[in-house]
Image: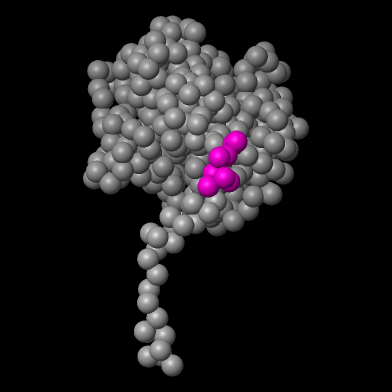
Amino acid sequence: MSATLRSVPRPDFREVAREAVEAKAPALALRQRPRRNRKAEWSRRLVRETVLTADDLIWPIFLIDGEGRREPVSSMPGVERLTVDQAVREAERAASLRIPAIGLFPYTDHSLRDARGSEALNGKNLVCRAIRAVKAAVPAIGIITDVALDPFTSHGHDGLLHDDGRILNDETVAVLIEQALVQAAAGADVVAPCDMMDGRVGAIRDALDRAGFGDVQIMAYAAKYASAFYGPFRDAIGTRLKGDKLTYQMDPHNGAEALREVALDLAEGADMVMVKPGLPYLDVVRRVKETFDVPTFAYQVSGEYAMVMAAAGHGWIDGERAMIESLVAFKRAGADGILTYFAPRVAERLQASL
């Protein structure tokens, strides 16, 4: 039987396809041909559903002490730690590119780090000096500051650590309140609690209002996951994490839990919410936007940036196209804005295309 099967002549597939097309010729006189709208660049632009602009970008900037220094971050090609004077120059560049806001992240000298993150409460710390300098030089640009202790603690955690390794929630919140007030007093426009302690948004909102900072906005890292994509960021701020953050950052397996976290932060007074990381959690971005319809942001984190840059550096992908495509994905998912290390590069490209 097998011999008989092998003896059957193989059909000429090209002839079969030709006959099928001829047989269906009337049907191919289609009224609907979606490709017509893709035929030219002008037409693709005209019907484009999602548009990326400089208005969608927030530029995270890393800070170091000193003057006139720019220090490369080895795990993030093209990203540097900047002294305050250099950060001011980049803030001016951001403003010229119409980037609405920058985020400031410090590399705190290890001699200033301790178990309680005391330097976070110093009104003259690196972040506060940078806020004042940028505001003096570029008053129109928005400044967003993280409220968390990991750049300041010797153990690398976002909160206070008990002797048995537990993160102390309520005790940490008390410190975060003071940190937020210090940043607001320095001139921060937006404080962004990224620590994932329970109840911290409401406590910070109450404290800001009582202290006369009612106009300072809160961008809550409402759905921040315990992700493997943060490694280069920890390199950039010099964090030496002891243990992990699984007991306070979210489990990557959970999606519905993010909606509960967002609902709590909004009820406590958050003006904007964020999902972090970005691309691995676009489903969460979409669910948050559709459920709450509030200003929703996403962070294209260091690991996402590093992957694109590494692959592009090896010639495995077109880095420029991957950069734009990844950011468009955030917008398509519903994000109102994106924190991305690509911000100046993208803004320059967008400006050149006008």
Farthest right residue? 267
Query: Considering depth in this image, is 265 or 108 the residue closer to the camera?
Result: 265
Q: Is residue 165 magenta?
A: no
Quarter holding residue 253:
bottom right
* Image vertical order of residue 32 relative to residue 251, above or below: above
* Image vertical order of residue 87 relative to residue 165, above or below: above
Number of marks in the rendered image:
0
Query: On the rendered structure, is 216 left or right of 101?
Result: right
- The N terminus is located in which quarter? bottom left
Query: Considering depth in this image, is 6 or 98 the residue closer to the camera?
Result: 6
Magenta extent: 25-32
x, y percent for residue 285: 60, 39
Query: On the rendered structure, is 333 left or right of 340?
Result: right
x, y percent for residue 231: 39, 46
Farthest bottom residue? 1
**Residue in the picture at 57% in, 45% down:** 26
Query: Considering depth in this image, is 348 or 133 the residue closer to the camera?
Result: 348
Q: Is residue 167 visible?
A: no
Q: Is residue 35 visible?
A: yes
Query: On the rendered structure, is 335 left or right of 78?
Result: right
- The C terminus is located in which quarter? top left
**Residue in the picture at 71% in, 27% down:** 269
Q: Is residue 29 magenta?
A: yes
**Residue in the picture at 71% in, 18% down:** 210
| Colour theme | one colour
**Residue in the picture at 40% in, 44% down:** 303
x, y percent for residue 220: 61, 32
